[in-house]
């Protein structure tokens, strides 16, 4: 696989292609982001989350309105969740997992298929790393779920929710490892090995990876 | 200020040729808490740029349903130059430059992807020595690319002008204040679209033509430095560790 870094405005292909991180001018396709070029595609290395129809997201209730809730979801836009779609009453700060049911041209987002998440922890990663964390046909996330016995929900907007039950520390360190090495090949095999080797991690401080993370944060 | 001889024996007062840029050094991703950032040293100019966004546009009435609003704040530190000694906050000049830099990036950022939102560019001049608006645009372009904000193109800018009757590239403070003319130009990378053109003083049509040719040559060099700065951060796998958000 050829991998080269591409800058905004550099040519991807000399034919018009509809890409989410490209634009067409004079029958040619150019990149709009800093990313890695693989064949005729661009994989962004960083960037904001852009909501799309059908995305599953994790958000927090940021406002309680007369007929529903405003959901804060790590974007410039807040989503709306009508309260007729859920039985229980939500409160400010509650965490939900939901699907983007409708999104219009000014990015008013309507949510549906809600699930309220309780007793867990939230992890934040860059939204561009999420496809790698999920893996092809959910392969990667299933791997982590099986190894850690946590229930894990991944939002396309960069939030990951992990249940308190199960080996939460291993799940957190595994997800961070994927986010860090998101652009390397053969990651599923590597993670399989990593999860097997570190299955006995109980204490957060025992894990060298997390220690490094903490060190980076302190600097 | 004492008068210096600006042009002598084909060399400028600091020993450069007419087409030479000052020494430029760019570093991308220097701030942890900004979405994108860049630090630039251009001769004696020292500039730091932080980019945030897209985020909610506040105040709401300034938001635009057709695209994101680009907010730029150009600020000179109180210690940045003799003229700024001890003063702080916005001035007539910094207000103008904020507007001008914002307008340059309105042309290249895909604002239509983020209706009603705002993208914020904060430019801080730590030390100024002529040509700060050009340096700010060059650095801001790197910071925007680092933030992953969709852009149609990269931008780089530089000043051309006339000192002692000669057309020169990249004027420093002395040449700027004692020369005949100073003209800031911003180019988009691919089509070489002119996104900014501001001139003080006067230049003939022929001089302007020559200035443009020289500017285009220097632009190549600047763009290469911008790309190198970004590649240095993103190409190295080890360096990518810093992009894990906690």
Image: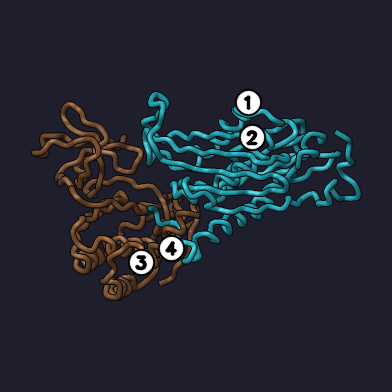
Chain colours: A brown, B cyan
| Disc 2: which residue | B76
Marks 2 and 4, how far apart in space? 37 Å
> In what element is the residue under mark 4?
helix
Give me the chain letter of mark 1. Answer: B
Question: Are labels 2 and 4 assigned to the same chain?
Answer: no
Compared across the picture, whether B156 is left or right of B129 comes to left
Please tell me which of labels 4 and 3 falls first in the chain.
3
Q: Is residue A121 rendered to the left or right of residue B15?
A: left
The image shows residue B28 at horizontal and vertical percentages of 55, 53
Tell me if mark 3 has few (under 14), some (14-19) or many (20+) residues whose alpha carbon lies within 10 angstroms of its own: some
Tag 3 secondary structure = loop
Query: Disc 1 on helix, strand or loop?
Result: loop
Q: Residue at x 21, y 31 (%)?
A: A64
Whether residue B221 is visible here, answered yes or no, is yes
The chain to which mark 3 is attached is A
Discs 3 and 2 carry the same chain letter: no
Would you name the residue on which mark 4 appears? A212
Query: Which residue appears at 27% of the width and 66% of the height?
Result: A202
Disc 2 crowd rating (10 Å Cα; few below 14, some 14-19, many 20+) is many
- Where is the N terminus of chain A found, in terms of image quarters? bottom left
Kindly check if marks 1 and 2 are in contact, taking CB atoms under 8 A apart as contact: yes
**Can you give x and y, in whole percent of width and height, for residue A169 in the image?**
28, 62
- Residue at numbered disc 3: A207
- Tell me, yes or no, whether dots 1 and 2 are on the same chain: yes
Using a 10 Å C-alpha cutoff, classify the residue at mark 4 as few (fewer than 14 neighbours), some (14 to 19) or many (20 or more). Answer: few
Q: Chain of mark 2?
A: B
Estimate the x, y position of residue B240 in percent, counting from the top left.
46, 61
- In three-dimensional space, the C-alpha distance between marks 3 and 2, rounded to whole angstroms, equals 45 Å
Residue on which the image places disc 1: B91
Nearest to the observer: residue B228 or residue A213: A213
Residues under labels 1 and 2: Cα distance? 9 Å
Whether label 4 touches label 3, CB < 8 Å: no
């Amino acid at each position: 696989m050829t991998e080269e870094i591409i800058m905004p405005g550099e040519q991807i292909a000399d034919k018009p292609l509809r890409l989410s991180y490209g634009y067409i001018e004079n029958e040619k396709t150019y990149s709009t982001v800093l990313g890695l070029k693989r064949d005729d595609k661009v994989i962004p290395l960083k960037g904001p989350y852009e909501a799309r129809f059908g995305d599953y997201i994790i958000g927090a209730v940021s406002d309680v309105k007369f007929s529903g809730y405003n959901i804060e979801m790590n974007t410039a836009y807040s989503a709306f969740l009508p309260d007729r779609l859920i039985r229980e009453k939500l409160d400010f700060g509650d965490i939900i997992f939901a699907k983007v049911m409708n999104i219009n041209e000014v990015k008013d987002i309507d949510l549906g298929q809600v699930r309220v998440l309780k007793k867990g922890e939230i992890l934040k990663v860059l939204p561009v790393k999420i496809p790698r964390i999920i893996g092809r046909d959910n392969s990667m996330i299933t791997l982590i779920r099986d190894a850690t016995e946590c229930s894990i929900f991944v939002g396309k907007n960069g939030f990951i929710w992990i249940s308190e039950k199960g080996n939460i520390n291993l799940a957190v360190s595994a997800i961070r490892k994927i986010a860090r090495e998101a652009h390397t090949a053969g990651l599923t095999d590597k993670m399989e090995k990593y999860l097997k080797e570190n299955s006995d991690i109980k204490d957060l401080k025992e894990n060298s990876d997390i220690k490094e993370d903490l060190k980076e944060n302190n600097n | 200020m004492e008068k210096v001889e600006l042009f002598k024996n084909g060399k400028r007062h600091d020993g450069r040729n007419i087409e030479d840029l000052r020494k430029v050094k760019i570093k991308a991703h220097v701030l942890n808490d900004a979405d994108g950032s860049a630090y630039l040293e251009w001769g004696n100019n020292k500039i730091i740029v932080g980019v945030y966004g897209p985020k909610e546009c506040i105040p709401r009435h300034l938001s635009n349903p057709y695209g994101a609003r680009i907010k730029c704040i150009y600020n000179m530190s109180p210690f940045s130059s003799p003229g700024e000694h001890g003063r702080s906050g916005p001035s007539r000049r910094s207000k103008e430059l904020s507007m001008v830099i914002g307008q340059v990036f309105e042309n290249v950022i895909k604002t239509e992807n983020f209706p009603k939102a705002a993208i914020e560019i904060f430019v801080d001049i730590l030390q100024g020595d002529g040509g700060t608006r050009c340096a700010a645009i060059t650095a801001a372009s790197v910071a925007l690319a680092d933030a992953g904000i969709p852009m149609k193109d990269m931008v780089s800018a530089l000043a051309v002008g006339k000192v002692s009757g000669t057309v020169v590239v990249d004027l420093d403070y002395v040449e700027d204040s004692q020369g005949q003319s100073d003209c800031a130009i911003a180019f988009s990378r691919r089509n070489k679209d002119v996104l900014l053109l501001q001139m003080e003083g006067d230049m003939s049509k022929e001089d302007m033509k020559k200035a443009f040719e020289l500017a285009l040559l220097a632009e190549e060099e600047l763009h290469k430095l911008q790309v190198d700065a970004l590649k240095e951060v993103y190409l190295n796998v080890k360096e990518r560790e810093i992009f894990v958000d906690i």
